[in-house]
Amino acid sequence: MASTKQRNRASASSADNDYETRFRQWTYLIPRDHGERGPRQVSDVSFFFKTGWDLLAGSDAGSQQRLIKKLASEEGIFMIKSLTEIMEDNEHDDREVVSVFQHGVSPFFQTISYPEIVSSLVLENYVETIYNFLYGSDGRRGAQVFRFAAQAISLIVVQYDDDEWRSTRTIVLKPCLAVLERMIELNQGALLHQGFIPIIETLSSCADLQKPLLESRRSLNKIRLRLGLGSLIPSATKLQQAPGQTATFKFHHDLPGALSSDGPRHDNDHDQVKDIQILPTFEEINCPRLEYLPFSNATNNHLGGLPALLDRQFRLLREDAIGGLRDAVRRETERLETGSVQLVPAKQRNQERTYVHEDLRLRRWEVDRRKGLQLVADFAQPTAVSQYGELRQEEARNAESP
């Protein structure tokens, strides 16, 4: 029994020593004078990332953290920069593009998109450092990196036959899309960068509809929606060709302003948000139709790209700010005019708590440089308060005062 434990300890110690040796050899691939010259050979840079991926894939959590922290250090960032500079070189022929991607870029993408790495709370800041550097200050580096990756993947699709592509796409397309999705998620400026649009179009043409690529298609769809490219989602005709495709249902969506099949809802209903007044108009308050709000599925909205993002944010923010006030005024107007309030379904009803004061009289108004417009008004005491005696009312006022 004791000899078995000793052998296990010896085996574990041997494995640790072997990993330590390989890790040290990996770090020796970083030139000492990296700040000045750095590696010039493409093979050296590719070998660095290929070796790093081999170390990561077969190691424990502690070793993985150590490797990622090294990549996020100054030395590791320099090696990533060396790889991106190789990808920015326009003198590569097609064979070299595919070679650099398969032996350097793809292992790097696999490393930084490894599930245990991305989900680790300990490595969160280190991973974000790598992704933010990959994107660059203005997105130019990120666009160039994935322009190169999209070109390489498209070349691989052309060179490989169907069987070879099916066996290769998991380690080629899936990590690339995972890194692109994460980079766009961390850098909102990518939503405004038009350079990613042709990249998505190229990657879309490389993705098929087979089940092994379900996760890749999910990443691709998320990227499209973030960039406002929902119209590039494969058409329904193409989806019907895929076996086991689930049914989809189409519902009528009432668009804003003149785009609505029933015409504008009121005088403040427009398809362009620049024409919408912030405060509700009289017609808007009394309109029985529901206000237009953007749909969760971007393909059903009337705009795309950056205009769709601005349109969505404006309409949702405006509804949060004045929707409750508009609905409360509408109900009170109905009560004053008819003596009753029409019941509204719970899903359409404003849930905010409102108070209605009777016999309002405006006494004066003034504009203060600091406080803005100020109104002084009188109104009747609420019924519950008016039933108090004078002493109890005084106690209530004293309790409310600071």
Image (tube, grey):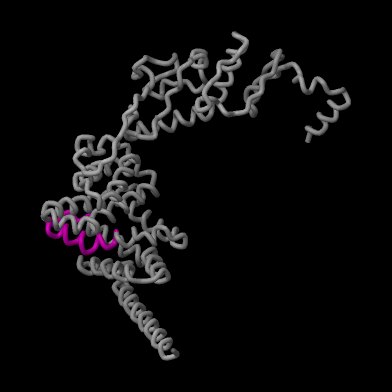
Residue at image x 28%, y 56%?
175
Residue at image x 38%, y 54%?
132
Q: Classify the position of the C terminus by image quarter.
A: top right
Residue 23 placed where, x, y %? 34, 75
Predominant secondary structure, magenta span? helix
Q: Residue most toward the right?
A: 391
Q: Nearer the viewer, residue 32 or 100?
A: 100
Residue 106 placed where, x, y %? 25, 60
Residue 188 placed where, x, y %? 39, 44
Query: Was residue 91 drawn as part of the magenta stretch in this picture?
Result: yes
Q: Classify the position of the N terminus by image quarter.
A: bottom left
Q: How many marks?
A: 0
The answer to which image quadrant residue 363 occupies is: top right
Stretch in magenta: 88-109
Horizontally, residue 79 falls left or right of residue 347, namely left
Query: Relative to 236, does residue 222 appear above or below in the rendering?
Result: below
Residue 294 placed where, x, y %? 40, 29
The answer to which image quadrant residue 258 occupies is: top left
Q: Nearer the viewer, residue 13 or 35?
A: 13
Query: Relative to 392, does residue 183 appear above or below in the rendering?
Result: below
Q: Nearer the viewer, residue 292 or 228?
A: 292
Query: Was residue 210 drawn as part of the magenta stretch in this picture?
Result: no
